């Protein structure tokens, strides 16, 4: 969906995921091992990110793709 497997993002937070709930899987990590993205396999569309794509969307193609995919999922496509 994002068009890349290695991204530079704006990860600036003081809290992080310690333990995922059943059915969720980590799919992206920061260099320090912090989980930055999760998915729920088998669900129609569930994706969560720990960084702030809303701050990057104007100049970051992967973030635009993330928001485009969300809008399309909301439209039921």
Image: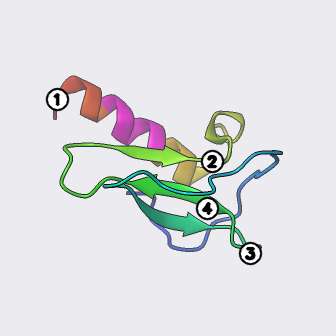
Q: CA distance from mark 3 to mark 4?
A: 10 Å
| Residue beneath disc 2 | 50
In this picture, is 31 found above or below 1?
Answer: below
Residue that badge 4 annotates: 35
Indicate whether residue 68 is drawn in magenta.
yes
Q: Which secondary structure, mark 4? A: strand
Q: Residue furthest top?
A: 75
Mark drawn on residue 76: 1
Q: Kindly check if marks 2 and 4 are in contact, taking CB atoms under 8 A apart as contact.
A: yes
In the rendered view, how is the structure colored? rainbow
Name the residue: 47% across, 64% down: 26
x, y percent for residue 14: 83, 45
Secondary-structure class at tag 3: loop
Sequence-earlier tag: 4 or 1: 4
Are discs 1 and 2 less than 8 Å apart at CB? no
How far from the left and from the top, in percent, is residue 39? 38, 54
Q: CA distance from mark 1 to mark 3?
A: 35 Å
Per the rendered image, the range of residues in magenta is 66-71
């Amino acid at each position: 969906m994002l068009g890349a497997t290695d991204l530079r993002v704006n990860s600036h937070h003081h809290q992080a995921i310690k333990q995922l709930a059943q059915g969720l899987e980590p799919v992206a990590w920061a260099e320090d091992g912090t989980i930055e993205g999760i998915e729920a396999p088998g669900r129609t569309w569930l994706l969560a990110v720990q960084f702030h794509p809303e701050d990057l969307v104007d100049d970051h193609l992967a973030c635009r793709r993330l928001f485009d995919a969300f809008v399309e999922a909301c439209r039921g496509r």
